[in-house]
Amino acid sequence: DTAVSQTPKYLVTQMGNDKSIKCEQNLGHDTMYWYKQDSKKFLKIMFSYNNKELIINETVPNRFSPKSPDKAHLNLHINSLELGDSAVYFCASGPGDTQYFGPGTRLTVL
Amino acid sequence: GQQVMQIPQYQHVQEGEDFTTYCNSSTTLSNIQWYKQRPGGHPVFLIQLVKSGEVKKQKRLTFQFGEAKKNSSLHITATQTTDVGTYFCAATSGSRLTFGEGTQLTVNP
């Protein structure tokens, strides 16, 4: 039944490590997104893919690389993690303007 | 890019009191959406407003879109503890949705 799912839910890691977050949607939407939510709850878009093609790439460090193997999946790989990367990362999908969010991945970099 | 300013950032109310959050833009918006995020949860779509002056209601929630389509409000009548969370407005600009900073609502029982 889950519409947009993300794994893992929690991720605790050391500075300098590389980690990935996976996202899958079963809603049949063409567009998927990654958002970052900081400690002040501000939601900022990072990337958007439409049918496996990158359409939005905000000012995000090169250490962040999205990958979309098919239109139902959008994964986020982060290299050389830094303390400032600690946040909640939300995957979302949508048929148009409306966004359907995943449960989020809380990343803590120590 | 398009920006939407949302106020207040925080609001504490007693259960039963009303609550309103406001969203403002310097440019005309094609539409505006509202989302609610419960503590520890994810944003959930509430509603989309498209027409100038549009008013929509969902039980105790009333959503308005300004006549000039530059502002919007969400009003909750007689808040309940289940209303606790962060309320976001969001506006479409091209292919992206830009979120306001959100209003964090706490309700004291």
Image (cartoon, grey):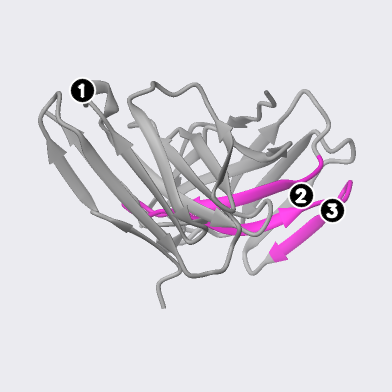
**At 60% from the left edge and 32% from the top edge, which residue is drawn?**
B6
Q: Which residue is mark 2?
A: B64
**At 58% from the left edge and 31% from the top edge, which residue is drawn?**
B7
Q: Is residue B52 magenta?
A: yes
- Image coordinates of residue A60 in percent, x first then y, are 44, 24
Q: Chain of mark 1?
A: A
What amino acid type should be assigned to the residue bearing mark 1? Leu
* Dots 3, 2 in contact, CB < 8 A: yes
The part of the chain drawn in magenta is B30-57
Same chain, labels 3 and 1: no
**At 64% from the left edge and 69% from the top edge, which residue is drawn?**
B59
Camera-near label (1 vs 2) is 1
> Which quadrant holds residue B93?
top right
**At 59% from the left edge and 53% from the top edge, which residue is drawn?**
A51
* Dots 1, 2 in contact, CB < 8 A: no
| Disc marking residue A83 | 1
What amino acid type should be assigned to the residue bearing mark 2? Gln
> Label 3 to label 1, Cα distance in Å?
44 Å
Position of the C terminus of chain A, as image quadrant, is top left
Q: Chain of mark 2?
A: B
What amino acid type should be assigned to the residue bearing mark 3? Glu
Position of the N terminus of chain A, as image quadrant, is bottom left
How packed is label 2: few (under 14 Cα within 10 Å), some, or many (20 or more)?
A: many
- Image coordinates of residue B79 in percent, x first then y, are 51, 58
B84 shown above or below A4: above
How packed is label 3: few (under 14 Cα within 10 Å), some, or many (20 or more)?
A: some
**SS for tag 1?**
helix
